[in-house]
Amino acid sequence: MTKTGMDLGSRFVKICIENEGELSFYKYNTIDFYKKYVSRDSSNQLKIEHSLLDNVNSKITATGYGRNLMNFSNAEVISEIKAHFQGARRQTGLDDFVLIDIGGQDSKVIKASGGFIDDFVMNDKCAASTGRFLENAANILRINIDEMAAYTEKPCKLSSTCAIFSESEIVGKIAEGVSTEEISAGVNLSVARRLLPLIKRFSRYEIYGAGGVVSLYGVKYFLQELLDKEINVLENYQYNAAIGCVV
Amino acid sequence: MKKVGFTTTIPVEIIFAANLIPVDLNNIFITDNNPHTFIDFAEQEGLPRNTCNWIKGIYTSVMQNSVDKVISVTGGDCSNNHALTEIFRSEGIDVTTFNYPYENKSRYVSLKAEMSLLADELGTDLDTVQKFQGNLQGVRSKLKRLDELTVDNKVSGFENHLWLVSSTDFNGDYLSFEDNLDTFLDEAERRERIKSNLRIGFVGVPPIFTDLYKFLENKGVHVAFNEVQRQFSIISEKRDIVEKYLDYTYPYDISCRIEDINREIKKRKLDGIIHYVQSFCYRQLQDLIIKREVDVPVITIEGNEPGGVDARTKIRVESFIEMLEERKK
């Protein structure tokens, strides 16, 4: 029987299927996924449609933002922290590491030692350091997120504490005539600066990165500069939690 | 008899000795069927959104005439109480202030002077208060017994929280409080022990969430320590009323609290600590010290409004529990 790991993120649902040791990966837009592949069974419980897996019998393990809101009748649910920890262990082959995961709505740092989770932190109450803010900023600048992420020269200062106010601050910068390049660099720097308090106290360890945001050039550039340390982006950085579900 | 409201725990013996009824204003707010209306009222009157909701709850409790006089604790608790005192005075409300001394040197003398002033203000004196304090000795030692039963898994963390937090004003009547406590203890002593996989302690101000204890209990966690609630019950066995309130850790510097927390972690065999902080509270800064000085893993959770625990906090707490369980294996 194959094993299926499912990371139900705020933007994308990431799926990892393990078949005789081989991993394959799939990604769906979260809204599309819920509409197409989640239904209710006869006892009104949520169920993941088997058509998703071409009707192959597979053991499903799920994690992600939706885990407290949903209880699937045909999937085991584990915490994101555990999923990321197991995923990073498998991807790095290490027992001791620090993993930083930056996702669409949250960021987390996990410290593992001796093959156990030793400590973890998650952002709370604020999404100013996450993918969603980058998406909104790119929308305002009318460029795509990858292009925005390429800029690191002469970052302009963005000082709002709130993601929504930051957006109006960006509009203000455009009005002042600040270049798109400088604003983009400023956005990348502000995301890195907000992440810093979460990571700073773990900076003496080897740091690995997961999640869509960490792979973006500008964010990674400023994070490395602020930490004075290299961040090793995992090979399947977007699928780390899904991989952790099949371990 | 007149009702005297207060903004945080004060030497309640003074109010009783003066033949007045003590009312913890926080309890009026949080035990109301609809505490949200307290916050809405305060915000409509102009209190900022980014201010602690307990302050708004206290504000509305007073403005809606729940008490005849207010004791505002302006030293040893939230400095928002300074502004709150000023607002009350501008509204013509009868307010007196009370200060726990922050400085360590000559703390006894300062606290004694504060207590004398308060006694005088309420129409009694410290000698009368000192004589009266024996009347509360019985109920206080029964609360201690309740706390021991919590350590012994016979009383739940929530029951512990509720009894101890209510002891700031004894619901206005210490005699019937003691009667009810007798009945409760009698029943609790004969209970089966609560089964649990983990023992957790709460530190920080009492959480504003309504279902946090239930959430933890459903996960097989026993809350065997409520730091501040326990302090509210004034555990010192000293007879001198001033000494008693010097042993109370909450209003003084954090080192006394850390010492108390670490001692209880050991004694109660706690696996981890949940540090609860209130949004916009100065005590959020102390989190840094608590994380550094406390001997077991600590997770910090933040609450703003009364109501259920939000999904994100649940995810974080669950992961914390999972981590502690793995460690224990």
Image (cartoon, coloured by chain):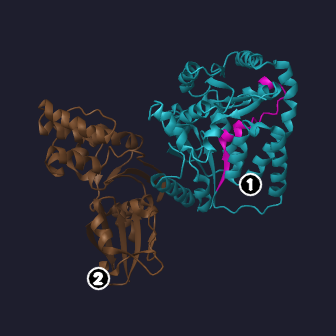
Chain colours: A brown, B cyan
- In the rendered image, residue B327 lying in the magenta stretch gets the answer no
Relative to A220, residue B10 above or below: above
What kind of element bears circle 1? Answer: loop
Check contact, mark 2 vs mark 1: CB within 8 A.
no
| Residue at point 23%, 43% (across, down) | A221
| Residue at point 78%, 25% (across, down) | B14
**Chain identifier of the residue bearing label 1 in the image:** B
Q: Quadrant of the C terminus of chain B?
A: bottom right
The location of residue B272, given as percent across then percent down, is 59, 50
Q: Hey, what amino acid is under mark 1? A: Val
Q: Hey, what amino acid is under mark 2? A: Asp
| Residue at point 32%, 43% (across, down) | A128
Residue A223: quadrant of the picture: top left
Relative to A37, residue B256 above or below: above
Residue B52 appearing in the image: no
The location of residue B125, given as percent across then percent down, is 82, 17
The location of residue A97, given as percent across then percent down, is 40, 53
The location of residue A114, given as percent across then percent down, is 48, 57
Residue that label 1 marks: B155
Q: Is residue B239 left or right of residue A228?
A: right
**Chain identifier of the residue bearing label 2 in the image:** A
Q: Quadrant of the N terminus of chain B?
A: top right
Residue that label 2 marks: A54
Residue B312 appearing in the image: yes
Q: Is residue A181 left or right of residue A33?
A: left
Magenta stretch bounds: B222-242
